[in-house]
Amino acid sequence: MRLLLDANLSPRRVGDRLRAHEHDVLALAEEAAFDGLADPEVLELAASQQRILITRNSRDFAPLARQWAEAQRPHAGIILIWTLQHNQFGEIVSGLNRLLDQRPAQERWQDITVAL
């Protein structure tokens, strides 16, 4: 699965574990070029690269997902982490793997927004 980790998720503790499960992970925190990217630009990047966006920033991305849906703008999927703390790495990874296993084909995530 092609994934984009927002800057608020650990590339090592979350990204590397997802990579170990054979996912193609782009972690914003690993790339200096993406430092300070605004939320709309993050979603635009994920959509343009056909990556499922994974973020803990539900406060900003939930309304953004709604705006995109209302404007009928396609994206490759969004996973909003609502209830887990940033340091609950094991729980985040197991929850993400559980969600990704429910829709094992990349195209099944098209325009889907789910909460973890």
Image (cartoon, helix red, strand yellow):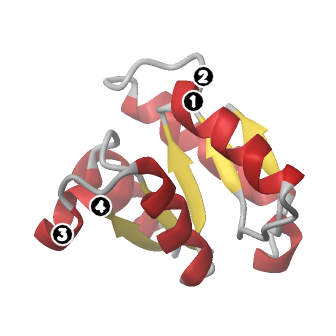
Q: Position of residue 85 (x, y in %)?
A: 42, 18
Identify the amino acid type marked 4.
Leu
Q: Which circle's residue, 1 or 3, is located before the other in the chain?
A: 3
| Distance from Cα at disc 1 to Cα at disc 3 | 22 Å
Q: Are marks 4 and 3 in contact (CB under 8 Å)?
A: yes
Q: Is residue 24 above or below residue 34?
A: below
Which of the two discs, 1 and 4, labels the residue nearer the N terminus? Answer: 4
- Point out the tag, 2 or 1, that comes first from the N-terminus: 1
Return the residue found at the far bottom. 49
The residue lying at 29 percent from left, 61 percent from top is 28
Q: Which amino acid type is shown beneath numbered disc 3? A: Glu
Q: Give the mark nearest the N terminus, 2 or 4.
A: 4
Instruction: State whether residue 55 is above or below residue 19.
Output: above
Q: Quadrant of residue 106?
A: bottom right
Please name the residue shown 79% across and 71% down the image: 74
Q: Are marks 2 and 1 in contact (CB under 8 Å)?
A: yes
Mark 2, residue position: 82
Which residue in the protein does label 1 denote?
A: 58
- Counting from the top left corner in percent of width and height, residue 67 is at 75, 46
The local secondary structure at tag 4 comes to helix
State the separation of the CA atoms marked 1 and 4: 17 Å
Q: Which residue is mark 4?
A: 28
> Mark 1: which secondary structure?
helix
Q: What's the amino acid at mark 2? A: Trp
Indicate the secondary structure of the residue bearing disc 3: loop
Q: CA distance from mark 2 to mark 1?
A: 6 Å
| Label 2, residues with CA under 10 Å away: few <14, some 14-19, many ≥20 | some
Q: Give the side of residue 4 with respect to residue 32, left or right.
A: right
Q: Quadrant of the N terminus?
A: bottom right
Q: Residue at x 18, y 69 (%)?
A: 31
